[in-house]
Amino acid sequence: MAKNSKEFLEGLTALADDLRKQIDANLDDWDTNPAAIAERRRKVCDPVNGYEFWDRHYFPHYGKAEPSELHKYLYKRLPEITNSAAGQRDAIAAPRGEAKSTKISMSFVTWCLVTGAKWYAIIVMDAFEQAAEMLEAIKAELEANPRIASDFPEACGQGRVWRAGVIVTANGRKVEAFGSSKKIRGRRHGAYRPDLAICDDIENDENVNTPAQRDKLQSFVTKSVLSLGPPDDSMDAILVGTVLHYDSVLSRFLKNPLWNRKVFKAIIHWPERMDLWEQFEGLLLKAETPQQ
């Protein structure tokens, strides 16, 4: 770690406090009578549309913008993954700023926990610190989100394991955080081996520079992460990130025909009049103030 353990844990505690403060505690528009709760639980547990309902109704503090094309895809694809008896392999590329981590590593994982869709989820990011921070976001929701507490009290509050990098929830589900290329083999949660592995932005601007670094990270994914699951190969694996190099690990899996692959771009259609952009750039560079 770049920081010593004490500094890291202090920073993680401060982050957790901030995350809990940001959660919208206003329940004025949230019907808490038993019939309303039962109906929302039914919708959340719907095998097809449940994740979309969950993501769009339980996290107002993450914004209420209309879903992007990526989000629409995730609302459809992620439930398909959990509904499949066979282990799924998905590679998803999207630009920065698309809330990939929020939707997949936080919201989707939390949905799997409260619905009982998964027993043991693994979150792998470029550095352990990043993965641990993502896990803090999940912990904050289970501890302080009044909407989740209202409808899924059996999954809320601190579980029997509740520390930096690993939790076991009140309803017995486990989530563990790891940095890329770290020792990860042989993970278990009682009788269960991991049934969901998310590799979220596991590359950085440095480790994509050389073929040797890229080969090493690809080997970590194929030999360590993908071998975590049960012998029947039923573990689902999602590799998501931004393409940083034409031969990055993500790029390699996006070319693998054995994986489900999807690429989203920042610009869907290029403008017909590119010359107008050049004119605008010229005007912008000549301006002396932002107002001009």
Image: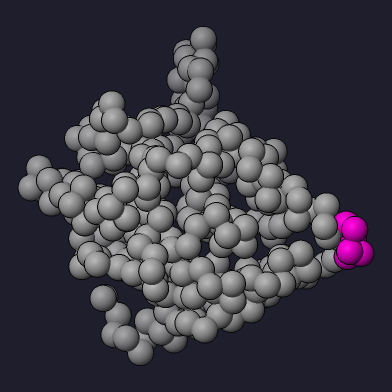
Residue stretch in magenta: 31-36
Do we see residue 224 in this rendering?
yes
Q: What colour scheme was applied to this rendering of the protein?
A: one colour
Q: Position of residue 6 (x, y in %)?
A: 35, 89
Which percent across, then down, holds residue 125? 34, 59
Q: Name the residue located 34 percent from the left edge and 69 percent from the top edge.
A: 188
Which residue occupies the foreground of this view, 229 or 276?
A: 229
In depth, the one of 138 and 226 nearer the eye is 226
Q: Is residue 286 left or right of residue 200?
A: right
Q: From the viewer's perspective, is residue 9 above or below residue 126?
A: below
Residue 35 drawn in magenta: yes
Q: Give the position of the C terminus as an image quadrant.
A: top right
Q: Is residue 292 visible?
A: no
At 48% from the left edge and 17% from the top edge, which residue is drawn?
Answer: 270
Q: Is residue 168 above or below residue 63?
A: below
Q: Residue at x 18, y 52 (%)?
A: 223
- Compared to 278, does 207 lie above or below? below
Location of the N terminus (image quadrant)? bottom left
Occupied quadrant, residue 157: bottom right
Which residue: 49% across, 81% down? 162
Image side of residue 227 versus residue 108, left or right? left
Q: Residue furthest left?
A: 212
What is the x, y in percent for residue 4?
A: 29, 85
Instruction: Please state which of residues 19 and 266 is positioned toward the viewer in this rendering.
Output: 19
Q: Position of residue 291 (x, y in %)?
A: 63, 41
The extreme top residue here reads 272
